[in-house]
Image (tube, rainbow, N blue to C red):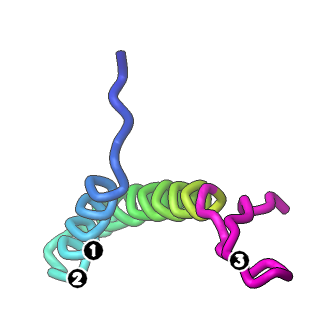
Amino acid sequence: MVKKKTFETALKDLEEIVRKMESGDLCLEDAVKSYESGMKQSKYCLDLLDKTEKKISTIAKGNDGSVKTIPFKDE
């Protein structure tokens, strides 16, 4: 069974990639590979955030003054 990567782990990996690239110690080939890997990590994080946002419910005030929860609508 393959364990899914958490958002926190993916973000930590992305931060490490950025740190390596900013150090200036990578050769061009490694920098390009790191950039590609970073873009994949970034997309993974953004996709996960998008999925999570869709799970969030919106709290609204009803006509009678009561508070109700409305499921987030998919677009």
Which residue in the structure is indicated by mark 3? Answer: 66
Please tell me whether mark 3 sits on a helix, a strand or a loop. loop
Residue 10, above or below 57:
above
Which residue in the structure is indicated by mark 2? Answer: 22
Which residue in the structure is indicated by mark 1? Answer: 18
- Does residue 29 appear left or right of residue 60 in this picture? left
Q: Residues within 10 Å of mark 1 (few under 14, many from 20)?
A: some
Q: Calculate the distance from the C-alpha at mark 2 to the C-alpha at mark 1.
A: 6 Å
Q: Residues within 10 Å of mark 3 (few under 14, many from 20)?
A: few
Q: Which contiguous range is marked in magenta?
A: 55-75
Residue nearest the observer in this picture, 69 or 35: 69
Image position, residue 62 (x, y; %): 79, 78
Nearer the observer, disc 2 or disc 3?
Answer: 3
**Residue at the image position 19 percent from the left and 71 percent from the top:** 20
Image position, residue 23 (x, y; %): 15, 81
Please tell me whether mark 2 sits on a helix, a strand or a loop. helix
Q: Residues within 10 Å of mark 2 (few under 14, many from 20)?
A: few
Please, which residue is most extreme toward the front here?
64
Q: Point out the image quarter for the C terminus.
A: bottom right
Residue 31 part of the magenta-drawn span: no
- Does residue 35 appear left or right of residue 24 in this picture? right
Instruction: State yes or no: discs 2 and 1 in contact (Cβ < 8 Å).
Output: yes
Image position, residue 30 (x, y; %): 28, 60
Image position, residue 68 (x, y; %): 69, 69
Residue 62 part of the magenta-drawn span: yes
Q: Say what amino acid the circle numbered 3 marks.
A: Ser
Please tell me whether mark 1 sits on a helix, a strand or a loop. helix
**Could you say which quadrant of the image residue 12 lies in?**
bottom left
Nearer the observer, disc 2 or disc 1?
Answer: 1
